[in-house]
Amino acid sequence: MKLPELRFGAPVECEGATILPVVRQFLGRTETSVIGSVTPVALFIVREPDIWFIALEEGCGPENLAGIRPSRT
């Protein structure tokens, strides 16, 4: 069983802005099954020259996200 990991999701373009989700990804395996989940925890919204951060989970801030990796899509 793997511990949940924070990852960047796939960016989405919307009306001149780029929305970059941050998700908590979990994957568990047994001999006969696989279970997984992806839970959004934050959003970065980029519209040049501005960047906004929106926490969707209490205690999640940009300083907690250093070193996270892109999701495998």
Image (tube, rainbow, N blue to C red):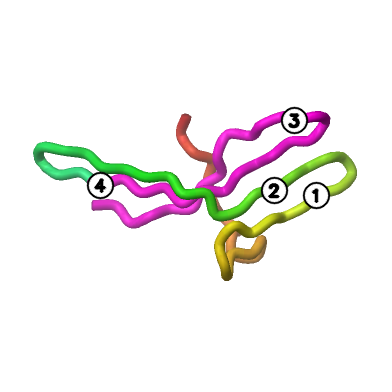
Q: Nearer the viewer, mark 3 or mark 4?
A: 3
Q: Main secondary structure of the magenta part?
A: strand
Q: Residues within 10 Å of mark 1 (few under 14, many from 20)?
A: few
Q: Is residue 8 above or below residue 3?
A: above
Q: Amino acid at mark 1?
A: Ile
Farthest residue to the bottom: give it.
59
Q: CA distance from mark 2 to mark 3?
A: 13 Å
Task: Say if 35 sits above or below 4 in the image.
Answer: above
Residue mark closest to the camera, 2 vs 3: 3
Q: Are marks 2 and 1 in contact (CB under 8 Å)?
A: yes
Cα separation, mark 3 vs mark 4, equals 33 Å
Residue at image mark 1: 51
* Badge number at residue 14: 3
For the residues marked 2 and 4, what is the alpha-carbon distance in whole angstroms? Answer: 28 Å
Which x, y percent locates residue 18? 74, 36
The answer to whether residue 50 is left or right of residue 72 is: right
* Mark before the other along the chain sequence, 2 or 4: 4
Q: Quadrant of residue 8?
A: top right
Q: In the rendered structure, which disc, 3 or 4, sits on the residue that comes first in sequence? A: 3
